[in-house]
Amino acid sequence: MARNLSRRTLLTSSALLAGGMLGGCGREFHKSDTVRRILGSAEHANFVVQRALGDRMQLAREYDEADISPDFQGNGTTNPATAEYDAMAANGFADWRLELTGLFVRPQAFSMAQLRAMPQRTQITRHDCVEGWSAIGKWTGVPLKLLLDRAGLGKGANYLVFHCADRLSGVRYYESIDLIDAYHPQTIMAHRLNGTDVPVKNGAPLRLRVERQLGYKHAKYVQQIEAVESLGNMYGGKGGYWEDVGNYAWYAGI
Amino acid sequence: MLGKMDSDMKQARGRTTPKHRLMTRLWHWVNAAAVIILFMSGLNIFNAHPRLYWGSYGSWGDPAWLQLSRFPGWATIPGYYSLADARMWHFFFAWVLAVALLIFMIVSLINRHFQRDVHITRTEWRWSTLRADIAQHLRRNFTHGSGTYNVLQKIAYALVLFAGLPLMIFTGLTMSPAMAANWPWLLDIFGGRQSARSIHFIVTWILFAFFALHILLVLLSGPLRQVRDMITDGTREPEERI
């Protein structure tokens, strides 16, 4: 009897699986909360396991000058093209400010000149887009850790939110990372790419590099870094533009 | 033959021997479901950038060794283009595939399924044996050979188990920027992230070819009995076995 039961269970579950696969391909099925919750559990598993498998300071591979891509692809917004942005671009971004707001002990703003005067890190790294392509570029910028030390991260701060100058479909682009990535040595606010100022298509004048995650985490045109306790109350609540709008994973390590 | 049957029966303590062990059957169906979902969601992911490169980098401005148009919706999961949703399916069932394969491998070493049924003996590697086996296949006689599987079957299964599926797992991990940072040797053994992506794609179609051949041979060798045996255990009454 037990044997028959297990056979029946096996047959039924196979049939259900096949049914779910073939019959359940409607948009409603894929967008349903239950399906998303079950499949989304893999995102959490990836986050926990990938973090556990490596040192939290483990560096992404750095390449040689000879490995640099001839053209570094610009993706997503390739020009914010607002009147305000165009005016600042025309002025060589002399008026661009990076504001540190939220849970900081000493909230403050940095001009591009101030950022350039700080200690810099240069790294030749591979940029992996969620779409599948990769580009290698040489980035120079201020380690984010130095900015956090200047402003003094306040109690209860768990995430950094990067607010950007560009809008996609009328919504302001933003991204967020946790403190492990924030203090990672390769996490820099980059203002130079391949020996020149970062081109507009790649995020001029300032973009985040967070080398162990996919491209959409690398916020471009960054104007503000906000330290927050949780991401749930900001924008769509999922911690990033593509996370809110397109159901992409917040943890983009894979 | 009688002697073998006797010992088989003794081993099963009064029961006749199952053709497929419970773990083999469980893994077969879990793996089948995972592979199909990974294949179809993988095609959806490929559609986001239907170009392939060798080396570390590769993008629209770089030379591609292969450029395709998008795979149609009926071949993908979901049935509409969504990179984000396809990635959810892909990464969930990647865990299913990898964990199931690991458990199956450990259990199959312990219950000696690999050693007894998949291990290819020195005699079987002889050209004469291989040639005879090919000839039998061409005559559509699939029930020859001394063990559960004939030698061509063993070679095919061993390649899928020990080369194809592990290659898919490790080239997949190489594409993850976090895993490539954790295990930089992944980038070295596959020759860079874009090469890993190309190998992932090529092995996909090799596994697809195995799948097609596998289905064809099941259809040619009594599909109802074959599928029944892979769901139930394929236990035979002694007279039926002969």
Image (cartoon, coloured by chain):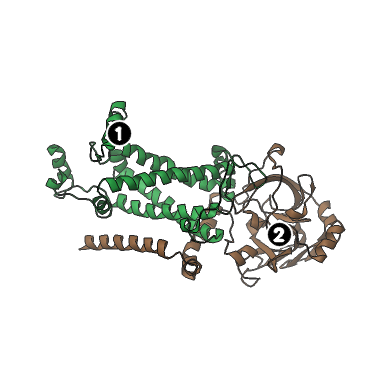
- The CA span between labels 2 and 1 is 58 Å
Up-down: is B88 above or below A59?
below
User: Which chain did the image draw in green?
Assistant: B
Q: Is residue A154 visible?
A: no
User: Which chain did the image draw in brown?
Assistant: A
Q: Residue at x 51, y 45 (%)?
A: B201
Q: What residue is disc 1 on?
A: B134
Q: Nearer the viewer, residue A80 or B18?
A: A80
Q: Residue at x 54, y 37 (%)?
A: B189
Helix, strand or loop at mark 1? helix
Q: Nearer the viewer, residue A138 or B144?
A: B144
Q: Nearer the viewer, mark 2 or mark 1?
A: 1
| Residue found at the very far bottom of the displayed protein | A233
Up-down: is B59 above or below B1?
below
Mark 2 falls within which chain? A
Q: Amino acid at mark 1?
A: Ile
